[in-house]
């Protein structure tokens, strides 16, 4: 075990993965500084998980809060790396012996249709800003982009997040339809009970509301939807079992939320009118040995709104080398980047797996490696002596200066209490 605070590590991003890494470092007496771009450190738990997951959200908030308020952990909110502090400066000038990137995946993968981006907010919306709006739009201080729940929405996707998109539309339409009839229902109850049961309670059926509803378009078959994860080396029996579970998950979601699904449709073109996107042209597809093959059959799907939900990728950060749309990791296991000897990555930024359990598990592995192996045993570290007291104080001085710049006085619980009460609707 390193002597208390004889080593210092910076973590970029304070959510599930960052907080997990911080807890592991702090338990080893390592001075741990967590830089978070937002006022609160909840990441996709706050802005991915839809707001009806009240219990899970509060549980995860609690876990993150507990980990970030441990001894040896210094939280630096409202500080984006690449935005307020350069990554290179953090790696080379601040005096940290290691950096852990835990900044998640916040950029929407672009819809692969030429010219699509010209229609953003003119008939086309991407998943990440839409869910952020949905989760926060009722808060008194919300000042982000404004969207609406629109009948006849077309969602392109296939993963769990895309199911959330069609659910948002269906639940929102149901609440609106009930409100127009003088009935107030609660989003959380509606999500738990489902649309048919809730409407039935009021003597109504979905058809009575007169909506077209939301449709999910997916380029593969329903059994291929990654709604239940497939283990890497699954044999035929396991594969078949997982495929059946996927069918069941979708069937259950459709029976509760009544959205439509069009599998085996790949987007191939835009339908535009008066400078607005009014639909998507799809090619029907078939699968050959797992590959998607476009057939000659095309379908025009018109819609009032198109939501693209085809995956989230890490946002570009100045200084981080990219390969295509992803960071150019040399080692995808520990998230190592060329040119940054002391940098590791944890969670969704490197796994690409959009779930809390995977982010936490990966962060645990990376942080344990960094704490146990890298800081003490690896060759690099033999060149890295423990921090001298003056070096530790120099880091703490810079941390305190940055905290002062964003008006954070070092009291995590008070800061979080204030940040959360300002968002309570
Ligand atoms: C619509 C949707 C629904 C989901 N539903 C579920 C679900 O039901 N169950 C489930 O398990 N998972 C779900 N997930 C996924 C899950 O929430 C995430 O995969 C997981 O929380 C990722 O954790 P993370 O710590 O790796 O990344 P994130 O939560 O993305 O955290 C990254 C943190 O880094 C910060 N950051 C980013 N860039 C910088 C920077 N440059 N400088 C400083 N800070 C930075 C961010 O603000 C954020 O706090 C859902 C996701 C979405 C989008």
Image (spheres, rainbow, N blue to C red):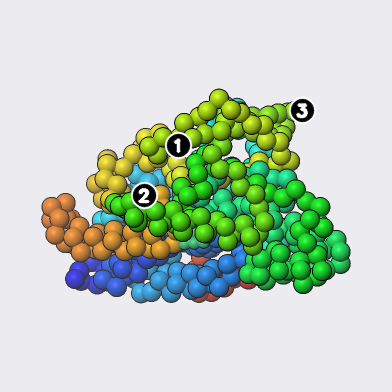
* Residue indicated by mark 3: 274
Q: Which mark sits nearer the N-terminus, 1 or 2?
A: 1
Instruction: Write the residue at 76% across / 66% down.
Output: 199
Disc 3 packing (10 Å; few <14; some 14–19; many ≥20): few
Classify mark 3: helix, strand or loop.
Answer: loop
Q: Is 220 displayed left or right of 124 in the figure? A: left
- The residue under the point 57% across, 57% down is 251
Q: Are marks 1 and 3 in contact (CB under 8 Å)?
A: no
Distance, label 2 to label 3, CA atoms, is 41 Å
Secondary structure at badge 2 equals helix
Q: Residues within 10 Å of mark 2 (few under 14, many from 20)?
A: many
The quadrant the C terminus occupies is bottom right
Q: Nearer the viewer, residue 300 or 305?
A: 300
Relative placement, left or right, of 414 versus 15 is right
Assess mark 1: CB under 8 A from ligand 1? Answer: no
Marks 1/2: CA distance? 28 Å
Disc 2 and disc 3 in contact, CB within 8 angstroms: no
**Residues at marks 1 and 2 touching, judged by CB atoms closer than 8 Å:** no
Disc nearer the start of the sequence (1/3): 3
Please tell me which residue lies in front, 133 or 87: 133
The residue labelled by disc 2 is: 350
Q: Which mark is residue 287?
A: 1
Judge left or right: residue 286 versus residue 165.
left
Percent from the top left, x then y, of residue 247? 51, 55
Q: Residue at x 40, y 71 (%)?
A: 67
């Amino acid at each position: 075990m390193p002597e208390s605070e004889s080593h210092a590590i910076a973590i970029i991003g304070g959510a599930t993965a960052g907080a997990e890494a911080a807890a592991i470092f702090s338990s080893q007496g390592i001075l741990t500084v967590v830089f978070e771009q937002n006022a609160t450190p909840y990441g996709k738990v706050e802005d991915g998980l839809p707001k009806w997951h009240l219990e899970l959200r509060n549980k995860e908030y609690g876990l993150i809060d507990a980990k970030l308020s441990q001894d040896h952990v210094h939280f630096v909110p409202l500080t984006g790396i690449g935005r307020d502090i350069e990554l290179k400066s953090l790696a080379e000038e601040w005096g940290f012996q290691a950096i852990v990137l835990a900044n998640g995946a916040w950029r929407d993968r672009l819809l692969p249709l030429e010219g699509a981006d010209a229609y953003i907010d003119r008939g086309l919306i991407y998943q990440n800003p839409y869910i952020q709006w949905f989760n926060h739009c009722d808060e008194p201080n919300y000042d982000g982009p404004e969207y609406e729940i629109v009948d006849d929405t077309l969602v392109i996707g296939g993963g769990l997040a895309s199911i959330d998109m069609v659910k948002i539309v269906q639940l929102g339409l149901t609440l609106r339809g009930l409100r127009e009839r003088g009935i107030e229902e609660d989003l959380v109850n509606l999500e738990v009970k489902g649309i048919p049961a809730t409407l039935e309670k009021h003597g109504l059926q979905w058809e009575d509301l007169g909506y077209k509803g939301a449709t999910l378009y997916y380029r593969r078959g329903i059994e291929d939807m990654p709604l239940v994860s497939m283990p890497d080396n699954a044999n035929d029996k396991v594969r078949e079992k997982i495929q059946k579970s996927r069918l069941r998950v979708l069937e259950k979601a459709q029976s509760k939320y009544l959205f439509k699904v069009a599998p085996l449709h790949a987007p191939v073109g835009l339908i535009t009118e008066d400078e607005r996107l009014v639909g998507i042209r799809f090619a029907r597809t078939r699968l050959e040995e797992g590959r998607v093959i476009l057939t000659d059959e095309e379908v025009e799907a018109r819609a009032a709104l198109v939501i693209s939900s085809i995956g989230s990728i890490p946002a570009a950060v100045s200084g981080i080398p990219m390969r295509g749309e992803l960071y150019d990791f040399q080692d995808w296991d520990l998230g190592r980047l060329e040119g940054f000897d002391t940098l590791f990555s944890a969670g969704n930024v490197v796994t690409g797996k959009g779930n809390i359990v995977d982010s936490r598990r990966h962060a645990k592995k990376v942080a344990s490696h960094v704490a146990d192996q890298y800081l003490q045993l690896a060759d690099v570290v033999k060149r890295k002596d423990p921090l001298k007291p003056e070096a530790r104080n120099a880091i703490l001085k810079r941390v305190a200066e940055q905290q002062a710049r964003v008006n954070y006085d070092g009291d995590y619980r008070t800061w979080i209490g204030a940040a959360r009460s300002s968002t309570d609707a």
